[in-house]
Amino acid sequence: MIQVLATSLTVVALIAALWSLVLAIANRPITLATKSTLGLAGVIVLLEVGLLAQAVAGVINVLGVVRGEVDVPTFIGYLIATTVVLPVGAFWALGDRSRWGAGVLAVACLSVPVMILRLNQIWGAPWMTG
Amino acid sequence: MDDGLKASTRSGPGRLLIAVYGIFALAATARSAVQIATRFEQAPLAYLLSAFAAVVYVVATVALGGVVSRRIAYLACGVELAGVVLVGAASLVFADAFPDATVWSDFGGGYGFIPLVLPVLGLLWLRHTGLRYSEESG
């Protein structure tokens, strides 16, 4: 785990989630025609690029650790999930031009810090091989 | 099933509900695939339940999205509610049988109790959209 990257991604994901939530509450659909939704789209693209970088670096790092120290398959599973959730979430959000589309985006963004937290737990915890 | 009912079930709050279902489908599927592939013999019961839960989440997600019939959506949400209550109770009473947690252990406590709330919301949403649709169509 690259801690600086993980922490930055957590912060950016929380900002994007909050931004989406504000749009949902203000009843501003994700149209990609207004500055506020385009800005959000930019932040989410940035976040996705960061998550892809983290996934690549994470796979390389985890394959280098001593066997048995980290639950490698679960770790890689979470890394893949972090890269999948935003594109799918964005696609699903754009299909609904109401406040609920923005709500979908908020949920997708909130899942990112949760998964990064789990990645950190797996990275830090010794894995018991029965 | 009518296309109008399908569309209204997957729009508005339903959109959000399906998104949360989708995240659980992804999480549960990935988790159980890793468990079964790497250490099935350590906790076969818990891992089989994880796989079953994953299937239920995937079915519920696509059924709420209108891909398969509404009856299957009701069934999936109902099975999910029964699963989280039964497995939740069993994981407390027979803790020895669950050396590793499933998504439904402790009534979904490991996932912020979302697994307990989700099927209730799913069933309420199906009922709500169904009633609204039958009122509108006569």
Image: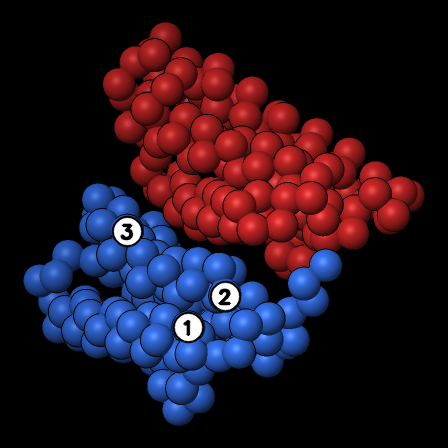
Chain colours: A blue, B red
Question: Which circle marks residue A72 in the picture?
Answer: 2
Q: Nearer the viewer, residue A76 or B137?
A: A76
In this rendering, position of residue B41 left or right of residue A64: right
Q: Is residue B44 above or below residue B99?
A: above
Task: Measure how far apart labels 3 and 2 are at the Cα level.
Answer: 25 Å
Looking at the rendered structure, the secondary structure element under dot 2 is helix
In front here: B1 or A58? A58
Which mark is on residue A63?
1
Find residue B39 and report its horizontal and vertical position in percent.
62, 50
Residue A76 x, y percent position in the rendering: 43, 63
* B131, B92: nearer the viewer: B92
Q: Residue at x 39, y 58 (%)?
A: A81
Question: Sequence order check: which comes first, mark 2 or mark 1?
Answer: 1
Have a look at marks 2 and 1 and say if they share a chain: yes
Instruction: Report the chain holding disc 1.
Output: A
- Residue A105: tell me if it is visible: no
Q: Which comes before the other along the chain, label 3 or label 2?
A: 2
Discs 3 and 1 lie in a common subunit: yes
The chain to which mark 3 is attached is A
Is residue B1 left or right of B82 when viewed as pictured? Answer: left
